[in-house]
Image (cartoon, rainbow, N blue to C red):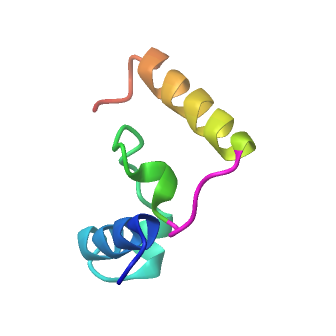
Amino acid sequence: MKTPVKSIRAYCMECGDGTCREVRLCHMFDCPLYPYRFGRRPTEAEKKELEQLINAVDSDPIVER
């Protein structure tokens, strides 16, 4: 039986065409599973970095979502 975080990793692998590279390069920052895509819980620093990235993308008028 997989842990919830490992199940999220498996889902992300499927979404990323089954390659680790695509999971690593994922650009779906607003996906609720994004912080867990590597199969582990994100650190506080990673959570903060993601929040800053999302805020930067939200404030950039050139970036289309």
Q: Quadrant of the C terminus?
A: top left
Q: Is 41 part of what is drawn in magenta?
A: yes
2 lies above or below 34: below
Q: Nearer the viewer, residue 10 or 30?
A: 10
Residue 10 as seen in the image, left or right of residue 58 = left
Q: Which residues are magenta?
A: 38-43
Is residue 50 placed above or below 61 in the rendered structure? below
Q: Main secondary structure of the magenta part?
A: loop
Q: With respect to residue 19, does 46 lie above or below?
A: above
Asked where in the image residue 16 lies, by quadrant, the reply is bottom left
Q: At which x and y percent is residue 17?
A: 26, 78
Residue at image point 40% right, 71% down: 9
Q: Is residue 40 magenta?
A: yes
Where residue 10 appears, x then y in whole percent?
A: 34, 76
Q: Residue at x 48, y 57 (%)?
A: 36
Where is the N terminus found, in terms of image quarters? bottom left
Give the camera-side residue of 21 and 31. 31
**x then y, percent, for residue 3:** 43, 72
Q: Which residue is at the front of the view, 6 or 29? A: 6
Position in image of residue 32 (x %, y %): 36, 43
Residue at screen point 47% across, 63% down: 25
- In the image, is residue 1 above or below residue 56? below
